[in-house]
Image (cartoon, rainbow, N blue to C red):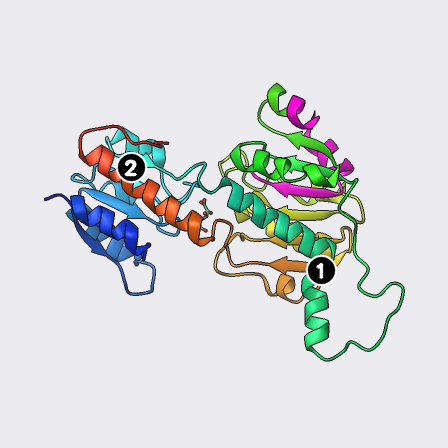
């Protein structure tokens, strides 16, 4: 029987599915596998179901001669040197589509929470500070009738746009290439990044992390944002230059930010933690029970397909 390694806990139903086909080892330690464990153990298996926290670079890939597929339990795959793996004949798959709505919902949750100061207000009440009405008490920003700037109109960016419909918003988008269907569907306008940053009330980032999107959002383009603007990131931390964002927030150049991802996870800059106008999530973009189950199933089905001699269902 072929052997599979699952590098962290996954839903029981998916484990059951995998066990019908393979002998399965799973890391149940509650800790990420160490670099040494990855280097010494991966090649004992025919397939790996990996987490986005597992760094699978050239050095790791050079240890692999048995492994036929690495199925990443994430849509993002910047943790894997995909080109090098493919050169070595290892298939790589990710989990697109099944998490797009959920991740877009997380971005919306952050947007609304920052704009309407929900976390700050909740904390104020719990701290026993609520005394009386005043006209500007916890006054935030309206969302309806505003301009939404979408950086990256791929699968998740499009779902994010779709969910804005009831808010009657103007949509600006920046993408590698124009998408006429998207423009027609949402009356969206294709603009360059600086125009988007300068004219949006809310900017939400949905690009994958690549060498060309690393630090795409920097001090210079954040400086163009409106004073009341809000920046949302549910993609990858390093798409935004984090220290520049801290500076922009300290200088009160924007209203606030909502972040699910960070440059050096799980480390979050203490400056951000101290700010009331920033809502911080611990990378839970796809974390609904339904979606995490669907992602695990898709990863498992990719492994089943490849180890039965087929192609990955969602190869990258
Ligand atoms: C993570 C994600 O996989 O799919 C991605 O690229 O970033 C998320 O869905 C998930 O949060 C793992 O913890």
Residue 199 image point, x, y percent: 78, 36
Residue ranking furthest to the left:
1
Tell me what residue is drawn at x 13 percent, y 43 percent. 2
Which mark is drawn over residue 277?
A: 1
- Image quadrant holding the C terminus, namely top left
Q: Nearer the viewer, mark 1 or mark 2?
A: 2
Q: Nearer the viewer, residue 251 or 77?
A: 77
- Image quadrant holding the N terminus, namely top left
Q: Is 187 colored magenta in this rendering?
A: yes
Which mark is drawn over residue 302?
A: 2
Question: CB under 8 Å between callouts 1 and 2?
Answer: no
Tell me what residue is drawn at x 24 percent, y 47 percent. 17
Task: Look at the picture and state if 260 lies above or below 153.
Answer: below
Residue 137 image-quadrant placement: bottom right
Residue 308 image point, x, y percent: 17, 33
Whether residue 73 is visible here, answered yes or no, is: no
Q: Is mark 2 within 8 Å of ligand 1?
A: no
Q: How many marks?
A: 2
Tell me what residue is drawn at x 78 percent, y 40 percent. 146
Q: Nearer the viewer, residue 105 or 241?
A: 105
Left or right side of 134 for 58: left
How many neighbours does mark 1 have within 10 angstroms: few (below 14), some (14-19), or many (20 or more)?
Answer: many
Q: Which residues are magenta?
A: 183-206
Q: Nearer the viewer, residue 134 or 225?
A: 134
Q: Is 73 colored magenta in this rendering?
A: no
Left or right side of 157 for 11: left
């Amino acid at each position: 029987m072929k052997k599979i390694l699952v590098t962290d806990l996954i839903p029981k139903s998916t484990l059951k599915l995998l066990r019908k086909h393979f002998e399965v080892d799973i890391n149940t330690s509650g800790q990420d596998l160490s670099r040494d464990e990855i280097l010494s153990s991966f090649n004992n298996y025919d397939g790996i179901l990996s987490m986005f926290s597992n760094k699978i670079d050239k050095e790791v890939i050079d240890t692999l001669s048995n492994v036929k597929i690495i199925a990443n339990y994430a849509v993002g795959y910047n943790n894997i040197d995909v080109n090098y793996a493919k050169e070595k004949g290892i298939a790589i798959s990710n989990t697109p589509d099944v998490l797009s709505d959920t991740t877009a919902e997380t971005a919306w949750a952050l947007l609304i929470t920052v704009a309407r100061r929900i976390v700050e207000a909740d904390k104020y009440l719990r701290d026993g500070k609520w005394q009386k009405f005043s006209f500007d008490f916890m006054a935030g920003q309206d969302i309806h009738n505003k301009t939404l700037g979408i950086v990256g109109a791929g699968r998740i960016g499009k779902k994010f746009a779709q969910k804005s419909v009831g808010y009657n918003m103007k949509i600006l988008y920046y993408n590698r290439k124009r998408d006429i269907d998207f423009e027609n569907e949402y009356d969206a306008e294709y603009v360059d990044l600086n125009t988007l940053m300068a004219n949006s009330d809310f900017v939400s980032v949905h690009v994958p992390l690549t060498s060309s999107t690393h630090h795409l959002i920097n001090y210079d383009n954040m400086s163009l944002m409106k004073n009341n603007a809000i920046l949302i990131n549910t993609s990858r931390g390093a798409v935004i230059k984090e220290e520049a964002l801290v500076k922009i927030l300290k200088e009160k150049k924007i209203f606030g930010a909502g972040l699910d991802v960070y440059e050096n996870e799980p480390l979050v800059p203490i400056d951000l933690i101290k700010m009331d106008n920033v809502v911080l999530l611990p990378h839970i973009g796809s974390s609904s029970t339904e979606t995490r189950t669907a992602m695990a199933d898709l990863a498992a089905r990719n492994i089943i397909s490849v180890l039965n001699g087929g192609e990955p269902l969602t190869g990258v």
